[in-house]
Amino acid sequence: MDDLASPVTGTYSDAPRLPLITLMEARDVVRLLQHLADHEGDDEAYEARQLAGDIAFRLPSE
């Protein structure tokens, strides 16, 4: 079986951890992806816009 298709297993510490990405970082990513999509006209720009929309949809509103 391909290692990438296998479920991820492991143990996790109870110690406090930083989030994988902060809310401010996520909003910056969305802003930059939208900027890229607005200034490019190829398939990657379309994918950037789709990703920006997917991420933005998951962010809490203020």
Image (cartoon, rainbow, N blue to C red):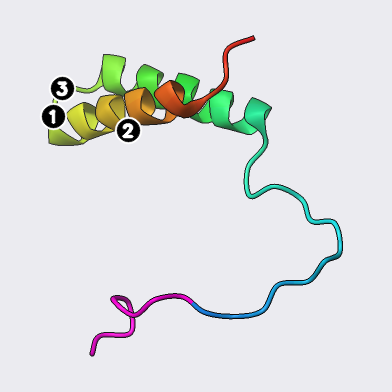
Q: Position of residue 41 (x, y in %)?
A: 15, 22
Quarter of the picture holding the N terminus = bottom left
Q: Is residue 13 above or below residue 51?
A: below
Would you say the residues marked 3 and 1 are in contact, meaning their CB atoms lie under 8 Å apart? yes
- Dividing the picture into quarters, in which one does residue 4 lie? bottom left
Task: Name the chief secondary structure element in magenta.
Answer: loop
What amino acid is labelled 2 in the image?
Answer: Leu
The mark tally for this picture is 3
- Magenta residues span 1-8
What residue do we see at 13% from left, 29% from top?
42
What amino acid is labelled 3 in the image?
Answer: Gly
Image disc number at residue 51: 2
Element type at mark 3: loop
Residue at image mark 1: 42
Residue at image mark 3: 41
**Mark 3 crowdedness (10 Å alpha carbons): few <14, some 14-19, many ≥20:** few
Q: Is residue 28 left or right of residue 13?
A: left
Element type at mark 2: helix
What amino acid is labelled 1 in the image?
Answer: Asp
Q: CA distance from mark 2 to mark 1?
A: 15 Å
Q: Position of residue 56 (x, y in %)?
A: 44, 22
- Dividing the picture into quarters, in which one does residue 33 lie? top left
Q: CA distance from mark 3 to mark 1?
A: 4 Å
